[in-house]
Amino acid sequence: MVEHGDIRVVHRGGSKINSREPVVTNDSRFLLCASGERVKVFSTSTEECVHDLRGHTDLVTGVLLRPTNHLQVYSCSVDGTVRLWDFTDGILIKTYDIGYPVYAIYASANHEGVFFIVTPTQSDNRSELFQLVAVHLPQSGDQLVEAQELSAVLSNVSSNPAATGFGRGGEYIASAKGLHLEVYFFKKQKSYRFSLKEDNKKGGKNTLMCIACHPKDDCIATGHEDGKIRLWRNFNHKKEYTYTTLHWHHNAVSSLRFTPEGTNLLSGGLESVLVQWRYNQESERDFLPRLGSAITHIAVSPDGTLFCTSHSDNKITIIQSCVKVSAVIQGLVNGESVRTDLMVDPRSKSLVLNGKPGHLQFYSLQRDKLLYNLDIVQQEYIHELGLQQFEVVKVAFDAPGNWMATVEERKPKAAEPEINLKLWAFDEQTQSFVLNTTVSAPHEAQITSMCFSQAADGQTSMLVSASEDGHFKAWQLPRSACTEDEGPSWSCDFVGDYRGLAPQCCCFSADGSLLAVSFQEVVTVWSPASWELLTTLSQPPKAIRDLCFGRLGCSKYLMGTTASNLLCCWNLLTCSLEWSTSMDVSLLLSDPLTENMAAFCCQAESTDLFVFKPSEPRPVASLKAVCSGKVTRAVFAPREEMLESCEESSQWLNRSQLYFLTQHMDLMTFTTKAEEDRLAASSKQLFIDDSVAMTPFYLLLGKHRKQENQDSLTRLSAELMPLPRGSLAIKELLQSPAHVLPSTSVLCSMFVESLLVSVADGSEESKHAEEEMESEKEEEDSEGEMESRTPRPEPASPGLQSAESAAPALTKAQLKELRRVKKLDHGWLADLLLS
Amino acid sequence: MASFKPTKIQVYPKLGEKVTQDTLYWKNYKAPVQIKEFGAITSIDFSPVAPHNFAVTAFTRIHIYGPFSQEPVKTLTRFKDTAYCGRFRSDGQLLVAGCEDSVVRLFDVSGKAALRMFRGHTKAVHVTDFTSDRYQILTGSDDYTCRLWDIPNATELNSYREHTDYVRCGVTSKLNRDLFITGSYDHTLKLFDARADKSVMTMDHGQPVESLLLYPSEGLLVSAGGRHVKVWDLLKGGQPLVSMKNHHKTVTCLCLSSNGQRLLSASLDRHVKVYNTTNYKVVHNFDYAASILSLALAPNDESIVAGMTNSILSIKHRKSPEESAEVSGQQRRTPSYRVFVKGKNYAPKQDDYLVSKPVKQHLAKYDKQLRTFNVSNSLDTALATWTRLRKPEITVAVIKELDRRGTLKNALAGRDEQWLARLLNFLIGNLVDPRFAAVLAPAAEMILDVYRRVVGQSPLVDRQLLRLQELLEREIDYQQDLLEVLGMLDTLFASSLPRLEVPHPGTSRANGLGAVTSKKR
């Protein structure tokens, strides 16, 4: 990332979680998956991200539970390291330095101290050949270990982790590449190779896509490009091998998995149907259809109760025993391309862009979470290659967020494109958008631009759509003509054109009194009230690319960029060109809250950002080399709370934040140093354990946890401080096994007591020392009681114990002084630390 | 696991009239009873007293019908020539009628022979009416005069010779015994006061006046003549209030609904229009088989009686509340309430173990077949006779969905002659519908591609294909004509636009061609 003084470009959310197979832990409580440079730990019941294992410096390519310890997990990465984590606490245990980029990792319980990785054959990254390498783990207590003992097992394997798998009891390893299946037996130290013909007679393609080995039986299942599944048996002989073929999928099988007992085989592919085949009774199949989008990976929990499927739309579905989808973990959907611009929903302040096919996704930027997907097309999605589907191509919101307009488009082969314009009203009750009007074929050709009138107070919104058919149309909601049974619906109010040219962009002024529509090199300015053509502005020789009105104090300016690398500013009062400058602006957008405008300029393979005010041609801020490639989508999102930065270069970020999409569909944003510091401070306070279900008891506990957190701050001044009584007692209760606890009748009173707010907690300065003394005694008494009643030694947290041992022995007077200090109100200190 | 999303059936905006309270009210009548009379029915009058019989004047007779009888209760036949304008007195005991032979006859409703004969007019008498004191009769005649007669002595009280053409309509005030209004073919309406010798007010209708109507409050007067219906404010000295021109032939008769909220006008163009009397907008419209000469509404709008030039009397009775309920009950024969409620309102007790059952998603048959990728079967289902004829939008939606799935060709291929004929029939019926053309045109192309080789093997299919070809050729001609008209209009609009300094802003407000807006329900 590039630094510019104190403004930094950072990744914001939406990394892929479907790139590799997810892993379900032994107790089925957590789901681990590789997500960009991190490993994310999700709770399978609440779908929340519990931990974020950070440490790798490049793409994580594999996650694997440690066979010998089910609370630890290996992750491998392209950065050439394999790391071992404790995922329940989110702690890095060990780092093995391999030295080569690792593309996949495998391990088996029968091969202790060894794991298998896939690395490129040559050391350089660009090589196409990969090999499977066994790595012997050096026994060392150090954090960072260099793994030296490498021995090649198979050469020329596929880099796809699904194409390799361990067989029954780790006796053999099978790997598929292209048309070949290779099986390596560890005992015999021998490998067999089986090949298929390139094309069978019916024109199907035999290429192997994925592999799965039966856990209890000598059987290998392979999935093929033509949708067939082959079950190989007898493969420990070169000649006498057999296979049976199963065929249900009509497109390539992308993932295969046996259940842990080997009774069922799961397969998935583009059809987005999870197929469950009975092993040995393959004619019996179960289907779980309409999972949303193509299945890329399937994972099964070790006890076989949960299935997880990753999907191509950056989603992980958790399925309970092949009948019920119990949870969906959805990341920011990264389509092949974002056809709609980036938009910000004025109500929820969420980012709106193309999501699943035919959907719009509302993505909360603050919480980095997908809020919901809105079905725009409302048609059954047919999962088939090469089929022309409806796509959402344009979205617009009106200023208060009451109306949304969408355009969907389908281009059948050799036929007219089908275009639908839909208008959605915001429904207060359901807090979602409800379809109000559908206009089929609003224009005869593609819609190039669409915008709502910006007038904030005007109840009658107006939508203008410009199309390549040479017309622009204004749509309005008639207020009077609503009948009893149905509400008002939108209708066309005006059709305009200019010399038969195709309009490119349209833009309303801030007060909604002017509409600018660009027709090639001419900008026409219309009055929406009377639909009169007021004036024309032009700047030959090239067509206008972008149009933008100034806001607030600069609303008399109209900005435009042309294809001939010119940025022009017209003054609408004098109808003349105010200033122009030569720069290759790929995207121009205005901040709705301030006068600022941002221009992304593409220069020599990298993009620069200029922020300026239309009133003067001098940039307010400029950032060089923001990212490589061209930026075509960006948006200003209003901040929840204003920043108070005084520096001139970062003042433009005070009220809103600028998000943009790079060429590789990464969502980036700009942050200032102050903001980052604040974020870091607040993240220290956050401690969520979502592994516990939200029960009333949890809520009760949560309160105590919070207290604990607050206390941790005061601990800075008073090192010696016992934990609050209540939380300790409850912890005690929860952690000790039931058989060692005394009878409930004994415990009950103590437990209830512990729930009450203790006298000592209500610390007030007005209290006298005698009272304090008394309460101290009480506390000591009760603690003594507790110890006498619980036979187990009190499990205090190790940190606290060490602190206690480190602190020198204190005299009684000092102790009293310390207590007094502790009783003081330290709220102001916490505030100070926070700010 | 998301549930299957059913095929979206496009909802098209309903064309034609909207269902309002008025349409519900005026459609709530039974099928008309039709009675053949001897000649054109010139007048219908309801008796103001209880059984509400009505007198129908046609040719040389007056038939009196009971409210529900289809045979006349009584027939008055003592006319030498065509009878006109049979009217009941306010007590329902006496009836007066004019005649082509210029004699006005007064009948007792229970008797047969005329009680009195009033002679004095020299030409046919088209207008007769009782004054509100019940002892006098107003007549208007083709001899341009209107006269007042005394019933007991059968003498003429007064004669007014102010009109300069036939007097063909007149109405007496129900509140004042001395006031009456006449309308004449000299285009004027005149208000007379029996206490004065001359008319007190004259209004010019502009066309020969055919019918007059006084509001119950008698502040407003409605006149019909030519294609116009005009409303006059009598309290403001005969100031014209509204002029309505909703018929395309002469308006012959006016009538007010019982609550005074709706005005009905009948015309030679075979329509009856219902107006709202607050804003004088047409709220409903009836059609009849022939030109209507007379129209009357029973008290409480119990029946609508219309007499036509082809001597048919049409009587429509209002449906009783039970009957209207019965009809809807027959349409939707549902199980009893108890069947649905059974077990649903059981509240679980504290110790009960709740087994939650997944909510079953209801899918249409074609959706079930689409879910299992049975594309041919789903197309069959969508082409079932009822769906194809009653809900073509479902058929079209399924075809569209198959096209989206890329399996339309598979679903269309391999069909037999009967099926293909059925599909082609559907195409012929719906291909040129602008709502469906975008979907059906590619489908039709695909059918031709698939079945190109078998053309000429089946006379049935070939005939359908020829019809399809004919239809398309005709449609292309229409489109060409429409484009020509559009071009003409454009030049007209362009020349009428004021010249602006800015060069040529091509503007057209809200034509929205090709945009079909639909409302999500």
Image: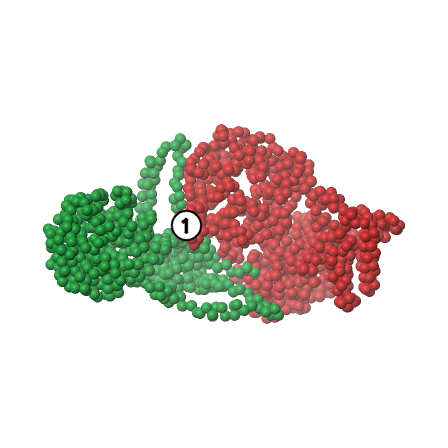
Chain colours: A red, B green
Q: Residue sitting at 74 percent across and 50 percent down?
A: A710
Q: Left or right: A181 with respect to B303?
A: right
Q: Position of residue B351 (x, y in %)?
A: 62, 70
In which image quadrant can residue A259 be found? bottom right
Q: Position of residue A219 (x, y in %)?
A: 65, 67
User: Disc 1 marks which amino acid?
Assistant: Val
**Label 1 packing within 10 angstroms: few (<14), some (14-19), many (20+):** some
Query: Where does the C terminus of chain A fall, quadrant-wise?
Result: top right
Between B464 and A462, the one nearer to me in the picture? A462
Query: Where does the N terminus of chain A fall, quadrant-wise?
Result: top right
Between A161 and A484, the one nearer to me in the picture? A484
- State whether residue B323 is above or below residue B14: below
Reading the image, the residue beneath label 1 is: B516
Q: Left or right: B338 with respect to B185?
A: right
Q: Position of residue A70 (x, y in %)?
A: 73, 61
Q: Residue sitting at 40 percent across and 53 percent down?
A: B13
Q: Left or right: A814 with respect to A32?
A: right
Q: Residue sitting at 55 percent across and 52 percent down?
A: A431
- State whether residue A341 is above or below residue B334: above
Q: Is residue B463 visible?
A: no
Chain where mark 1 sits? B
Could you say whether the residue bearing mark 1 is in a helix, strand or loop?
strand
The number of numbered discs placed on residues in the rendered structure image is 1
- State whether residue B194 is above or below residue B361: above
Q: Is residue B225 visible?
A: yes
Q: Position of residue B492 (x, y in %)?
A: 32, 38
Q: Residue sitting at 52 percent across and 65 percent down?
A: B360
